[in-house]
Amino acid sequence: MKSSIALIESAFLDTRKPLLRLLKRRVGCSHTAEDLVQETYLRVIQQESIEEIGNLPAYLYRIASNLVADHGRKAVMSAQAHHEPLAEDLVCPKPLPDKITEASQELDLLDRLIAELPPQCRRIFLLHKVQHLSHGEIAAQLGISPRTVETQIGKALRTLRDRMSMQ
């Protein structure tokens, strides 16, 4: 049986080029990709026991993938650390009172328009949009075909869209 170092060397020789190509595509820089490949193998060498690893090449790819994610997080954090606040960063993220009123009025209108739909159409629409039931679940519950459910939902959406645009 090969020693741990021999297994790692063999895996390094077998996976280095394809791993390097993958990392170059993911990070967009050949120097960074080289560094990440080296870091991948350093991390494997530092493992106490690699005999427990069932698939060493897959393990190398997993480590490399994690290192790419770490690299991306560090890049984002670095960019944020050097970020000067812009005017839009200082604006309160809450909507303005007039926008809240406008949205509330639109919801009231939509509620009225839904109430005006034909009873079966309204029931099917609400089961789908509010209770998040699938077409098949609605069909089974109401004893109708899934195609009828689909037709009624389409009818409700068209009617609501048309009536909302007229208001």
Image (cartoon, helix red, strand yellow):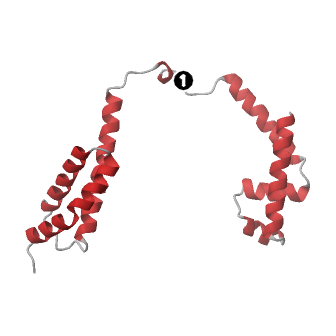
Residue drawn at point x = 81 percent, y = 59 percent: 124
Q: Give the residue type that dot 1 points to.
A: Cys
Q: Quadrant of residue 104?
A: top right
Q: Is residue 55 above or below residue 118?
A: below
Question: Dividing the image into 4 quarters, which one contains the C terminus?
Answer: top right
Q: Is residue 115 left or right of residue 105?
A: right
What residue would you read off at disc 1?
92
Image spot of residue 120 (x, y percent): 88, 59
Q: Is residue 143 left or right of residue 23?
A: right
Foreground pick, 69 / 6:
6
Q: Quadrant of residue 134?
A: bottom right
Image spot of residue 115 (x, y percent): 87, 47
- How many labels, in total? 1
Foreground pick, 37 / 141:
37
**Mark 1 falls on what kind of element?**
loop
Residue drawn at point x = 86 percent, y = 43 percent: 113
Q: Is residue 59 visible?
A: yes
Judged from this view, the residue extending furthest toward the bottom is 1
Q: Is residue 74 left or right of residue 161?
A: left
Residue drawn at point x = 83 percent, y = 49 percent: 158
Q: Quadrant of residue 155?
A: bottom right
Q: Is residue 59 above or below residue 94?
A: below
Image spot of residue 53 (x, y percent): 22, 71
Question: Dividing the image into 4 quarters, which one contains the N terminus?
Answer: bottom left
Residue drawn at point x = 90 percent, y = 56 percent: 119
Image spot of residue 71 (x, y percent): 29, 45
Mark 1, other Cα within 10 Å: few <14 / some 14–19 / many ≥20: few
Q: Is residue 67 left or right of residue 128?
A: left
Q: Is residue 69 visible?
A: no
